[in-house]
Amino acid sequence: MFCFQCEQTAKGTGCTQVGVCGKRPDVAALQDLLLHVLKDLSRVAVAGRKAGVTDPEVNAFTVEAAFSTLTNVDFDPERFVALIRKGAALRRALAEKVRAAGGDPGDDAEAVVPAETLEGLVAQGERVGIKADPEIDPDILSLREAVVYGIKGLSAYADHARILGREDDEVYAFVHEALAATLDAERGLDDWLDLVLRTGKTNLRAMELLDEANTGTYGHPVPTRVPLGARKGKAILVSGHDLKDLEEILRQSEGKGIYVYTHGEMLPCHGYPGLKKYPHFYGHYGTAWQNQAKEFPLFPGPIVMTTNCIQRPMESYQDRIFTRGLVGWPGVRHIPDLDFTPVIAKALEMPGFPEDTDKGSVMVGFARNTVLSVADKVVAAVKGKAIRHFFLVAGCDGAKPGRNYYTEFVEKVPADCVVLTLACGKFRFFDKDLGEIGGLPRLMDVGQCNDAYSAIRIAGALADAFGCSVNDLPLSLVLSWYEQKAVAILLTLLYLGIKDIRLGPTLPAFLSPGVLDVLVQRFGIRPITTPEDDLRAILG
Ligand code: SF4
Ligand code: SF3
């Protein structure tokens, strides 16, 4: 196997024996084969659009299948076998439709015919992995993989939006164009660079769709205090990023004497009016994804993983963790639709929390509507020099010790500066009381990684208010990345021309020295150093 799509890749170069994330070589090969099937399907979808043929099932399948190969989503070989077979069948059916419409779907002989057995499929996957072409130019490989990982992240956002009824064929058309382009051995460096930035552009649209989907369905988040302790009684823990799953769990468990808690990236859900209206939606349990093996054994109820990041479940909670959506782990019970009866039954069967406990609380709900509703106050505070600088300290968390940088950074931010945050990296500092400046909290949680769009809108609106570009605002981006949604967001920021981003804890292994050089020259992107040095460099 060879995989270097995430930040924790082995030795900072690539996982070759087994994934640091726990991905086994057979699953890695199946993911490679699925991706190859998707690229081939995309080629036919591109030909289809030229002939006026689009297929909603193909569109939905493409983003679902790409999302399922994102880090820490699906570790179950059987699920990938099913996706590979479905992808190949969709390709055959689509090619026929395209031909019937007078289009040219290409040569069927080039299509993948999935092997009969798991071993056969794994062998097929091993032939189409990242390093399949030993002759490929390292910069082209780097840009091609940047596109693929950006598409995986974008697909996650598009899939979340689709679940809530928001779609745009332009997004699907680009996903197909980009995946088909990865099969084109003739593309030059400039074409690849262009495709990288267009991936960022389309990701912005996908995030916009998701923002419309979330706020259109559940209302705009409002500032909300979320307890970190527990209420005496039965309990369900919901993790991941999927708001629809959470809503259904709340609806189906209402009036049953069960309290529902969020975990990880679900924390910001407490701010949505359409979700916080449930009286049994109580509080937040635990911290970021990489601590689940420590925190889940102590939760006295069932746990539902709606999306990434799942870690290898410990034996002590194997029988009460459930996967939903695209998440999978061999041997873990999967909820195939929105019927959460088994989860509720498990909650009723388990003891729940024996008593109330108080562990403090945190505030959520500082998404674009909240922040922009006090834009005048913010602008006045900056002009009156009460606020010197804004920091967006955002992104993923992970297990590496280098990630303490973000905790220290936030602790050392001077008292006249404001910290905006989003995504699971915030668990390094989310419960710190940084106080207020002129009635504004100094630490504001914009939401999930899925809400990066909200932060972009806030930055854009502030730039408008000051009559300058985002790059000229007293704002610095200090980002932490781990998986491919973060890659997609980074590509969006580059597409928007945002400069001087600080990125850590390490730079992506898939960026070749040549590509990194271009990013440094054109965008001033740089690795984090130490909190002291970075703060000094930013604030002068
Ligand atoms: Fe390694 Fe990350 Fe790939 Fe898992 S997803 S195999 S940790 S690079
Ligand atoms: Fe976190 Fe997995 Fe990226 Fe949503 S939950 S930000 S890592």
Image (cartoon, helix red, strand yellow):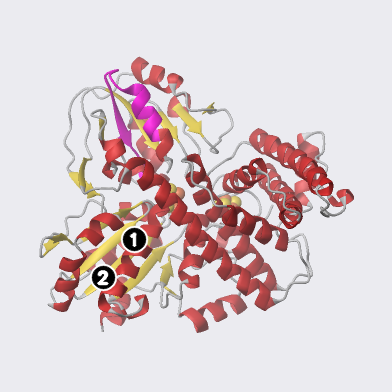
Residue 64 picture location, percent across and down: 59, 43
Region in magenta = 246-264
At x 53%, y 48%, the residue is 167
Q: In the drawing, what numbered circle is on residue 236?
A: none
Q: Is residue 411 left or right of residue 19?
A: left
At x 70%, y 44%, the residue is 30
Query: Could you tell me which secondary element the residue under label 2 belongs to?
Result: strand
At x 35%, y 37%, the residue is 295
Mark nearer the N terminus (1 vs 2): 2
Residue 441 picture location, percent across and down: 17, 59
483 versus 524 height, above or below: above
Q: Is residue 175 left or right of residue 461?
A: right
Q: Amino acid at mark 1?
A: Asn
**Residue bearing mark 2:** 390
Q: Residues within 10 Å of mark 1 (few under 14, many from 20)?
A: some
**Residue bearing mark 1:** 404
Judge: label 1 CB < 8 Å from ligand 2: no
Distance between the Cα atoms at labels 1 and 2? Answer: 20 Å
* Residue 49: in magenta span: no
Between 363 and 460, the one lying in front of the other is 460
Do callouts 1 and 2 mark residues in contact (Cβ within 8 Å)?
A: no
Between 488 and 80, the one lying in front of the other is 488
Q: Amino acid at mark 2?
A: Phe
Residue 522 picture location, percent across and down: 51, 82
Q: Residues within 10 Å of mark 2 (few under 14, many from 20)?
A: many
